[in-house]
Amino acid sequence: EIAEMLPGILNQLGAESFSSLKKLASTVAASGDNKQSTEDIDEDDDGVPELVGNFDETSKGE
């Protein structure tokens, strides 16, 4: 689990990287209310067609 690995990761970061990580964490926490649900994201994929057919069968004929 990531929580168990975090102390080891933080020990390997330099001061500049640690500051950047703290800034990123605060930015993510502040924007947490603006997250889209996965259902909203799936609905935005209207331009991508659904996968139909079996490509394995088609490739055997080549």
Image: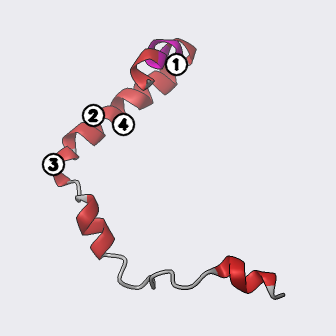
Please tell me which of labels 4 and 1 falls first in the chain. 1
Q: Position of residue 48 (x, y in %)?
A: 44, 82
- Residue to which mark 1 is pinned: 9
Q: Are marks 4 and 2 in contact (CB under 8 Å)?
A: yes
Q: Nearer the viewer, residue 12 or 62?
A: 62
Mark seen at residue 24:
4
Q: Are marks 3 and 1 in contact (CB under 8 Å)?
A: no
Crowd rating for badge 4 (residues with CA inside 10 Å; few <14, some 14–19, many 20+): few
Q: Position of residue 16 (x, y in %)?
A: 50, 24
Indicate left or right for 1 with 31 as reference. Answer: right
Q: Label 3 is placed on what type of residue?
A: Asp
C-alpha span from label 3 to label 1: 27 Å
Please tell me which of labels 2 and 3 falls first in the chain. 2
Magenta portion: prevailing SS class: helix
Q: Are marks 2 and 3 in contact (CB under 8 Å)?
A: no
C-alpha span from label 2 to label 3: 13 Å
Q: Secondary structure at mark 1?
A: helix
Residue drawn at the location 45% of the way across and 22% of the way down: 18
Please tell me which of labels 3 and 4 falls first in the chain. 4
- Residue to which mark 3 is pinned: 33
Mark seen at residue 26:
2
Magenta range is 5-10
